[in-house]
Amino acid sequence: MSTSDKTVRLTTAQAIVRYLVNQFIEIDGVETRIFGGGFGIFGHGNVPCLGEALYPVQDILPLYRGQNEQSMGFAAAAYAKYHLRKRIMFCTASAGPGTANLLTASALAHANRLPMLMLCGDTFLTRLPDPVLQQLEHFGNPTLGVNDAFKSVTRFWDRITHPAQVIQSLPAALATMLDPADCGPAFLGLPQDVQGWTYDYPEEFFARRVHRIRRQAPDEAEIADAAALLNQAERPMIIAGGGVQYSGAVAELTAFAETRGIPVVETIAGRANMLADHPLNIGPIGVTGSDSANAIAERADVVLAVGTRLQDFTTGSWTAFSKDAKFIGMNAGRHDAIKHLSNPVVGDAKLALSALQEGMGDYRAPDSWTSEAQTERRAWDAYVEENVAYGNRPNSYAQAIGVVNALCDPRDRVVAAAGGLPAEVTANWRTLDIGTVDVEFGFSCMGYEIAGGWGARIAQSEAEQDQDTIVFTGDGSYLLMNSDIYSSVLSQKKLIILVLDNGGFAVINKLQNNTGNESFNNLIKDCPTIPEPFAVDFAQHAAAMGAITETVANPAELSDAFKRAKASDKTNVIVMQVDPYDGWTAQGHTWWEVGTPEVSDNPNVREKHSEIEAERAKQRQGV
């Protein structure tokens, strides 16, 4: 019997686990398992079969027990982001509500183009015991269930209805997750009976396989067109997105910018593509950006957008640029490369930047343009320095960010998401080392902060780094999802968590007021259904989960507390109240399109609607 004819009898669940264990990836010449492990909460839909299959391999495929399926998915996404999409975690959840809890996390991974494998229980294929516990019944379509909801928030979706299907489905799911153009979450629905059914699998299916991330070379004609357009530019600009880091193209981006003298601005996902003090780093762009980046964006005649999906917070809802500006979309994904009639360069950023470098001749941007951009950046740096300073001013997010920025190690990882902190971190954080900032704003998802910090810390510890993972979260996000403080304590994955308490959803209250509306249902004190507002003692709450906690009164006390947290080997939670009204970063914003009422009895709303609509004149119409 030839090797290819040999078979092994396994359950569906055992086959899935054996396959995952034997998938490796080459990173910088070193082969390591693609799957660093998984996050799991067991229930009747996954514990008898998938749990049985995972138990024997717990040493090489560690299973981290989460407290909530949604936060497990957030942790998995942050883990993949830390590893630049080269290593992946799986999440397993039981049928019904356990799996449904992963929907938000899957949407987050999809929006941020991050890989995550979901192995989720499903209803019985035979339907003999129907209706079963937690099953949704659709009278006219018995095939439809909770798991079908994942079709809109995954890049790959399958329901395994026969054990043999995993022979095709697992490689297809993995190929999707490792594809730079299609990267995103993959979902496998595993009916409870099928998980335990057996099949004689070919042993070759479980052979050790080493994968490599595909690098698609750009088309020569597209490079030539891009070079011709840039060679005519008088005021060129580069937008550096998260794809620069995923491609490993930071060095190529920097070399291209330096050779050509072209100013670089960063998206939220692309923060930490360049150090803060690099002379061509002109700052973050867009709604939560900097005056410096937005000033040159208004005047740029050719914009090279590298590895960005150009979402509205980058483009100012497409008001940040001149209507005459021409775009070059350099992206592994065709969908992103052609946005707003960009001249597309479809391909890997590392290869494409190198090819464009070779095709540009001796072109260099006019010194006057580069100097103008640098002057704008110096003015922005001066504003940030003043903005993060503290003294006789109300406590603010910016001040807390400045304290941490001044004291952290260059390789510490900063995590933030949703609410006011993404804007404040993006605008005020000065990058100390490449790839050290994770501001989740693709889905802007409350609750990601602590869970994402835990996932990042797991990845960080695999790299045997002593640096810290630092989480910025507001009180609103903390109350939404905080249980992974307990997870970090249990797993001994230290976090430093700053809870900046502004008494509710203060940034949305600011938006409410800025659109002419009265404060309503955002700050705790403005909720009509709350007769007697009171403050949560976040320090006591976090301490109950095993964290070392402190409440500080001001940034000076925060500085001392942060030093103690750095010296500690356990999770620390530091709480500080910040002002919900004053202290917001006032500069650096472009217009952002939000829906406002065309008619209202409130004259302030009518006035603000007119002001907001007047700015629409700057908006590009997709051309």
Image (spheres, rainbow, N blue to C red):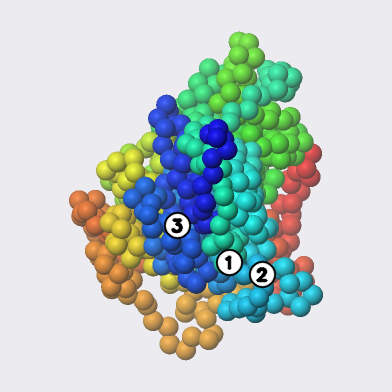
Residue 599 position in % (x across, y down): 77, 71
Left or right: where does residue 544 sit relative to residue 286? left
The residue under label 3 is: 53
The residue under label 2 is: 126
Left or right: where does residue 247 sit relative to residue 483? right
Viewer-proximal residue among 49 and 106: 49
Query: Quick one: label 3, few (<14), some, or many (20+) residues within 10 Å?
Result: many
Give the amino acid at mark 3. Answer: Ala
Secondary structure of the residue carrying numbered label 2: loop
Viewer-proximal residue among 36 and 526: 36
Secondary structure of the residue carrying numbered label 3: helix
Name the disc covering residue 114, or none.
none
Name the disc covering residue 193, or none.
1
**Residue 15 visible in rendering:** yes
Q: Earlier in the sequence, mark 3 or mark 2?
A: 3
Q: Earlier in the sequence, mark 1 or mark 3?
A: 3
For the residues labelled 1 and 3, the Cα–Cα distance comes to 15 Å
